[in-house]
Image (spheres, grey):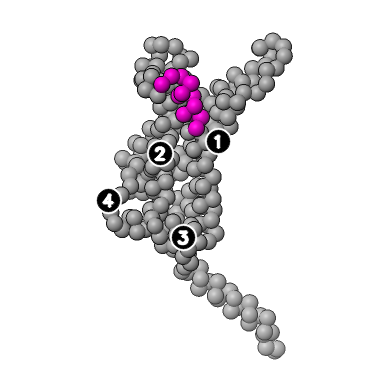
Amino acid sequence: MSAPSPSAHATVDQDALELQRGQTIKSVYVYEVPVRLWHWINALAITILCITGYFIGSPLPTMPGEASANYLMGYIRFAHFAAGYIMAVGLVGRTYWALVGNHHAKELFWVPVFQKAYWAGAFSMLRWYLFMIPKPNQYVGHNPLARFAMFFVYLLLSVFMIVTGFALYGEGAQMGSWQDRMFGWVIPLLGQSQDVHTWHHLGMWGIVVFVMLHIYAAIREDIMGRQSIVSTMISGHRTFKE
């Protein structure tokens, strides 16, 4: 009986190495189902809001013929309003789940800015994103820099967009509507209707920039980092790689 070939030995050794490497990978359940559902539904709503919001701010050329045969802008506005309601209701639901969910569900709503260790971790992650250190620290939930961005950029900007959006919607819903009663004060606070339109439009571009950086950081971390990011928001489990 002939001895195994060198290539067979190499295959066995490689399999053993991969098996040993696989045993070093550990998984922790981080994001519960309501958090993951909110994330993806919110992502879809933001995509629709940004696309339709751009065309509302820069409308398509006027089309000839009867208005009833050219209702494209009406459909765009309807999609924008519907996505806005979904985003607003989703944020209310997400706030509720921060109260009843696990401790990772609360990370979106507060940042430990008075803890020295938090700032040390945030600056360490910043150096990692700037390619100044060879590898980042491992975090079960959001890393410190991501928590800062999610709270001070995404959350506050989302609240601003919802408030100004309903203020503008209240103009069309007329005085006395619940939108006007709850958010009508925003227009005189910021000056006039056109000022609110301008700030709302600028806020849209702020969200676009945030989404681009968010996607870049998530994909980069999945490839170069020491823990899973994208798949975690699908399965809920964060996998750590050594």
Q: Quadrant of residue 34?
A: top left
Label 1: how many Cα within 10 Å (few below 14, some 14–19, many 20+):
some
Residue at 64%, 17% in the rendered image? 71
Q: Earlier in the sequence, mark 1 or mark 4?
A: 1
Left or right side of 59 for 195: left
Q: x and y percent of residue 126 in the render?
A: 44, 56
Secondary structure of the residue carrying tag 2 is helix
Left or right side of 13 for 104: left
Task: Give how far apart the Cα atoms at labels 2 and 3 are.
Answer: 24 Å
Q: In this view, does 113 lie above or below 98?
A: below
Identified by mark 1, the residue type is: Thr
Label ID, residue 47: 1
Residue at 58%, 29% in the rendered image? 54
Q: Which of marks 4 and 3 is nearer the N terminus?
A: 4
Q: x and y percent of residue 5 in the render?
A: 69, 84
Give the position of the N terminus as an image quadrant. bottom right
Q: Pointer 4: what residue?
A: 114
Label ID, residue 98: none
Q: What stretch is highlighted in magenta?
A: 191-202
Q: Pointer 3: what residue?
A: 128
Q: In this view, does 18 lie above or below 69?
A: below
Of badges 2 and 4, nearer the viewer stands 4
Q: Nearer the viewer, residue 51 or 9?
A: 51
Secondary structure of the residue carrying tag 1 is helix
Q: Pointer 2: what residue?
A: 155
Residue at 48%, 15% in the rendered image? 172
Identified by mark 3, the residue type is: Trp
